[in-house]
Amino acid sequence: MDKLQQLEEKIKKLQSQKNLIEQKEKAKEKKLLNKQKILVGGYIINKLKNYDDERLQDFILKVIETIPKKRKFDIEAVEKLEILNK
């Protein structure tokens, strides 16, 4: 029995180490994704500066159409972007 308990403890320890490594990897991936979003967003904003008003409005309406209704805050953010660019 003693050996069985030792093995169970070792399994628990290895499982917790595995979970910790997985959490760190997920955090790394999320951080990279956020950096990518920021870079793409900056690129798009710079591109929008060259759009005329009609083209900009068409672009913003197309973006709003792609956002699901449940993501209301994203729609509000895009609409505020449109107001700022007028």
Image (spheres, rainbow, N blue to C red):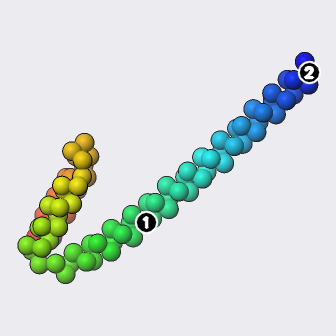
Is residue 77 visible from the viewing direction of this image?
Answer: yes
> Given the image, on which type of amino acid does mark 2 rest?
Asp
Tell me: residue 74, above or below residue 47.
above
At a point 81% along the width and 29% down the height, the residue shown is: 9
Circle 1 residue: 36
Q: Is residue 18 left or right of residue 28?
A: right
Q: CA distance from mark 1 to mark 2?
A: 51 Å
- Amino acid at dot 1: Gln
Q: Identify the residue shown where x is 53% and y is 57%.
A: 29
SS of the residue at dot 2? helix
**Left or right of residue 32, residue 42 in this image:** left
Question: Residue at position x 69%, y 43% from top?
Answer: 18
Give residue 59's quadrant in the image: bottom left
Mark 2, Cα crowd under 10 Å, few <14 / some 14-19 / many 20+, is few
Query: Residue 20's image quarter?
Result: top right
Q: Is residue 58 above or below residue 21?
A: below
* Whole-percent x, y for residue 57 in the image: 11, 67
Q: Which residue is mark 2?
A: 2
